[in-house]
Amino acid sequence: MSEQAGGRPTAVDVSVIVSVTERPVRLAELYREYSAALTSSGRQFEFIFVVEPWHKGSLEGLRALADQGDPIRIVESRHVIGESAMLKLAATQAQGRTLVLLPAYYRVVASAIPEIVAAVEGGADLANCRRWPRRDSWFNRIQTRVLHSAVTGLPRTQVRDVGSGVRAMRPEVLRDLPLYGDFFRFLPVLALRDGYSVVEVDAEQHPLDTALRIYPPGVYMRRAIDVFGLFFLSRFTYKPLRFFGLVGTLLSGIGALILMVMFVQRLGGRGLADRPLLLLGVLIFTLGVQAIALGLIGEIIVHFNAPGHRSYRVATATLETAGEPEAGRADQEADAG
Amino acid sequence: MNKPVPDLSIVVPSYNEAANICPLVEAVRDALPGLDWELVLVDDGSTDDTGRQMAIAASSDPRIHVITLARNFGQTSAMQAGFDYARGDVVVSMDGDLQNDPADIPRLLAKLDDGFDLVVGYRVARQDRLVTRKIPSWIANRIIARITGVSIRDNGCSLKAYRRSILERFVLYSDMHRFIPAMAVAAAGARVAEIPVRHHPRVAGESKYGLSRIWKVLSDLLAIKMISSFRSSPLVMFGWAASVSAVLGIGFALLTLVSVPGGFRSGMAYAYVFPSIVIVLFTSAFYMLLLGLIGEVAIRSDPTSGPIGVLPPGDEA
C-alpha cells in the first residue's frame, strides 16, 4: 500500500472517498467538479482516492493537483483487495466528520454533494443519493428498477436507488458495518438493518451518466447472487437452521411422501424396480436431509462465534456497559416476540 | 460517571409497552423496599411512546436506567443488552407487559440464597389464551425438557433470577432466551430451582407472540440438541448420518442383486432404478462425512471456544 498526500486542511468537515475500481473517468476533472461544489458550500474537505493496481495510469492529473497543494490523497493498493476493503481502508484514513462515497465516474450533479452532507449534519446517519429525475436510457432504468424490486423484497429496505453509489454518512457507519465482497453496493440497506437512520435525497442525474449500460451476463448473475446473499444474511445470519431446516423439511417431506405412497403400493403388489419415481423420492429425501445437515453446520459456526459478537446495537444508554464491551454488530432479524 | 454498583439488577426488555412502563416502575418500587436495586429498562426499538415513558421514569429515579436499541432486534437480543449493562451480583429478568409480578422477586432472591445459581418462575393460573399460548407452551416445555435433559415447567416465563457469574458464561442470540436454563446447565453446570409465580392478564398493549414461533422453537431446539450432544465432535454426528445412508445403499445394492433378474448386468432399463438409488445413497454418505469434517474445522478453528456460545474460563467480564 502506498500513499501520496497533497495539502491537508487542518479541520476537515468532509472526506470524499473515491474508489477507483471500474471505468474511471478523468479523475482530475471529476475532482475539480465535485470539489468546486464543496468549496462553494463553505466546508473544509479532503479527497481520498483509493486505487486498484490496474488504474494507476489514470492518476497523473491527480498527482499534479496534489503536488500543487490540493487536498488530495492517493492510496494505491498493490494487489486487488476489492472495493469493500478499499472503502474500509479509506475510512481509517479519513479525517472528516462526514464521509462521502463517490464512484470514479459521474452519477449525480455536483450540487447534490453538499445536500447529502447537510442531511448527515442534520442528524441522519446516512444519506443516499437517489438519481431523480433520471435522464438515462429506458434500459438503464429497467435495470435499476429490477434491482430495486429485488432489494425491496427484503426486510427494512426503504431505499429507492440502491445503485447510485453516492452516499454521505457518519464515519462510524462505514467503520462499524460488516462490509466485504460486493456488499458495498447495499450500504444503505445494511445501515438500515443495523438500525442507523437513513434518508434519501433526490439528486439530478449527471449528464455524463446517460450512456446505455449493458454488462456481461456474469455481472447480472453476480448481482442476483448478491441480492440472495443479502436476503439470507438479513434474516438468517444467526439462525441458519431456520432457512436450511425449512428447505430441508419441505424437500424431505415431499420425498418421504413419495416413498410412503410407493411403499403402500408395493404392499398392494405393485413392483418398485421399474419405477424411476422411486429414485426421485430417494433423491429428494436425501437432498432434504443434506440441506438440514448444512443448516446444522451453519449453527455450529454461529454457536462457536457467539461469544465474540452481540446481536444488537445500542443507540443510547444511561449506563456504561458492565459486561462485554463490544456491543456493536447487529446481524439479527427483528422479532417482536 | 456511573453510580455505585447495586446488589440487584432488574432487566426489563420492552417493545411498544408505553402504557405499562409507569405502572411497572411503581410495582418494582413497591415490591423491593429496603433492597439495593437498579432497574435496567431496554427499549427494543419501540415505535410508540415507550422510549419517552422510560426517559421520564429514569429522570425521576437515579436507580432507573434506559438502554435504547437502534431498532427492534427481538426479545433475546434486548435481554442480552440488559444483561450486558446490568451491574448487580444478582440479575432478575422479567417482561415489560406487567404480566409478571415484581412482588415475586423477593421470593426468587430467597430461593437463590438457598444455594442455587438460577431460579426460574413458573406461572400458576396463567392468564393467556388456551389455544395459541397455553397449549403450544405446554407441548414446547415437554419437548424442551425431553431433548435438553433440563426439565423446566415453564421455559417461557421471563421472570428468572440469575447469579451474575452464570450470565457471564454464555451469550444469548437468535431466540435462545427460551433455553436459558438449558444453556446455563450446559455452560456452567448451574444449579437450577423453580418456584411458582403469579401471572396477571395483560391490561394494556398487545401480545407480540403468535403461532409462528412454533417453527422457531423447533429449529432452535434441534440446533441446541445437536450442538450440545456433538459439540466435541461433529464428525461423529455426521458420521452417524453417513452410516445410515451407506447401510441403506448396501441394502438397495443387495436388493438389486436379489430382485432384478441378472442383477446389474441385466441390461434392462428398469434395472437402473435400484443401482441409481445405490449411487445416490453412497454419494450422500460421502457428502455427510465431508460435512462432518467441515464441522470439525469450524470448531477447531477457534480452540478457545467452549460449548453453546460459552465464554472460555477466565474471559468473563
Image (spheres, grey):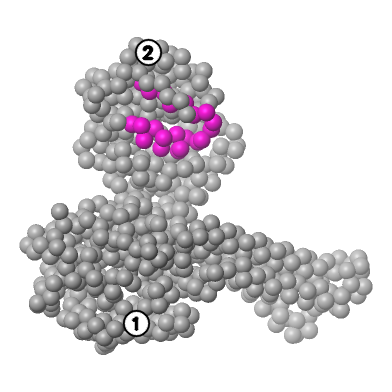
* Residue A91 drawn at (x, y percent): 36, 35
Q: Residue at x 26, y 34 (%)?
A: A97
The residue sitting at 55% across, 72% down in the picture is: B230
Q: Is residue A30 magenta?
A: no
- Residue A323 x, y percent position in the rendering: 29, 61
Which residue is under mark 1? B192
- Quarter of the image where one finds residue B48: bottom left
* For the residues bearing labels 1 and 2, Cβ distance under 8 angstroms: no
Q: Which residues are magenta?
A: A72-94
To which residue does mark 2 refer? A67
**Which of the two residues, B285 or A147, is positioned nearer the viewer here?**
B285
Assign a secondary structure to mark 2: helix
Q: Is residue A76 above or below residue B156?
A: above
Q: Residue at x 45, y 53 (%)?
A: A233
Asked whether, in this view, residue B51 is left or right of residue A74, the answer is left
**Residue type indicated by callout 2:** Asp
Q: Nearer the viewer, residue A99 or B258?
A: A99
- Please give left or right for residue A252 compared with residue B102 in the image: right
Mark number, residue B39: none
Q: Mark 1 belongs to which amino acid?
A: Val
